Image (cartoon, helix red, strand yellow):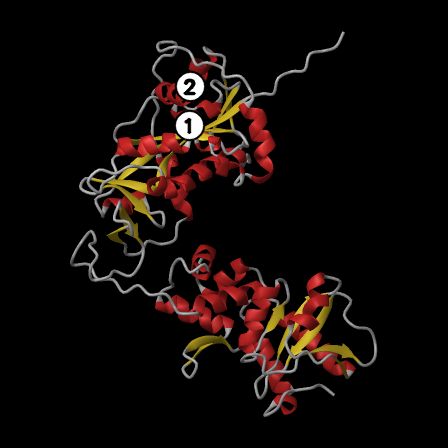
Amino acid sequence: MNQQTQPPQRMHHFYISIAKRLYQHPEHGIVLVDDPVRVKEAARYGLSPIILYGITVAGLPIRWMTFSSADDLRPLDEILLEGWRTTEGLRGLPDVLRINRHLAAAAPALAEEMAKIGVRVDVAAPKDQSLPGSMRSAQDVCWYLPRFYCRYEDGCLSLPALCRGALEESGRYRRDTFRSCIGGKADAVDEWLALPVREPPKTGALSRIDWTPGPWLHSWEASLPPECPRFFTRDESDKFSLLLAEELPSSSWGPDDDITVDYEYDDNLFECVRDLVECWPNPPAEIARSAGITLRELQWFMADKAPLDEQKRVALMELLGIQYDERLEMFLEVGPYTLVARKQIPLEGTCGNITLGWDASPCEIVPASGEADPSWRYFLLNTFGEPPSIVMAPRGETIADRLPDVLVNYSGIAYVPRSLYKDVVATCARAAREPAANVSEMSKFAERHKEHWEDAEWWPE
């Protein structure tokens, strides 16, 4: 007898969080935040947090969202039944409702109540990425939700209007344009939408499911850069209010009129640091530690999301051999360096600055006698009249084979005495021991061979 094919398991992701980009203001209604702001900092601007509730079909771009104020939490039975009833794309009740451990602890009655209607509650494993991915996607939707799906009254967006806009957005899977945005998931979406709807129970089938809020609602704050001044403005169409993270203009209004903050980014310094760190022999964590900053501070600075104070900035510049060129009015990598070729674009940026626009004749150094280093290839950046730098490329890797094309004005292979080659290898090894040794060891190397490069481009003989 043929065994009947089992229907696919239906799984929904259920999540709750404070909205990263949406806050409520008593005068201006819903305010859209360009860069997420901490709840405590938002309060300085008179902003109150908004709770985001969401249900997503596991693995598919079909979701339902709604919102409430943080001081008016909605019971979970009400939220879930509303979502299952109002959003056809969810196809009614799932077999499994996946939640995170924080929500499981905050609503201990959820599993028992869901069992009454045949839904099993599953707590996501610590390394599960699908549930957090669904919540991140919902947070991203909050950015364009007020722009395209909401209707305004007197230039303000109310919380009920935001919820209506979210409901309209949940039906986007019906539009022709939706299919062009989901790529290879179109067939899976069609299969899901072909499933019959499992009607949710009528009102009264579930007891009230209250839940307890906690810091887990805004755990996303941990990844935010340090706070910066922000100001309120209107969007270009003058529909809604925005809270922007930029230098305070004279026409803006902030939380405190007598607060004046000088907050400027460092021109191209963050780009120099970013490219150099990509090419540095040591990992970013060691570079940050040597500069007296945290890895997160370094990452924020390289991403142009947060500045460093003067002392930390100077320490980082000294460590990385970066100076300000008053003639060019920009920061430049001066070095000299031992660099490691990993990614083409950062390497091109760094080497281009070191050589002042490729005023050099780079070459690969190979011993005239004896065996070459079996692990690394060594390329000389011989800038005119300046100390040379060395680019190490892992032998056998694609980037090593491409360096002759990447290094502008590449002049081929230079066969050098065995003693010089050994000095290059030993110097690079010492320069790579720790971040602070890089410029120091390469400066000593340059001094030992000063007669070869001073007032000229060094072409090893």
Instruction: Give the labeled residue for mark 2.
Output: 110
Q: Quadrant where the N terminus lies?
A: top right
Determine the secondary structure under disc 1.
helix
Residue 256 is left or right of residue 208, and the answer is left
- Quadrant of the rendered image containing residue 78: top left
- Residue 249: x, y in percent? 24, 61
Looking at the picture, which amino acid does disc 2 mark? Leu
Outermost residue on the front side: it is: 176
**Residue 422 in picture, x, y percent from top left:** 73, 77
| Label 1 neighbour load within 10 Å: few <14, some 14-19, many 20+ | many
Q: Disc 1 designates what residue?
A: 103
- Give the position of the C terminus as an image quadrant: bottom right
Residue 154 visible in the displayed image: yes
- How far is the residue under mark 2 from the one under mark 1? 9 Å
Residue 322 in picture, x, y percent from top left:
48, 74
Question: What secondary structure is marked by label 2?
Answer: helix
Label 1 near label 2: C-beta < 8 Å?
yes
Q: Is residue 308 above or below residue 379?
A: above
Viewer-proximal residue, 304 or 187?
Answer: 187
Q: Is residue 117 above or below residue 79?
A: above
Q: Quadrant of residue 116?
A: top left
- Mark 2 or mark 1: whose residue is earlier in sequence: 1
Numbered badge on residue 10: none
Kind of residue indicated by mark 1: Leu
Residue at image location 41% in from the left, 42% down from the top = 220
Q: Nearer the viewer, residue 210 or 291?
A: 210
**In the rendered image of this protein, does residue 300 appear above or below residue 196?**
below
Residue 91 in the image: state x and y as whole percent.
49, 21
**How busy is the neighbourhood of tag 2: few (under 14 within 10 Å), some, or many (20 plus)?**
many
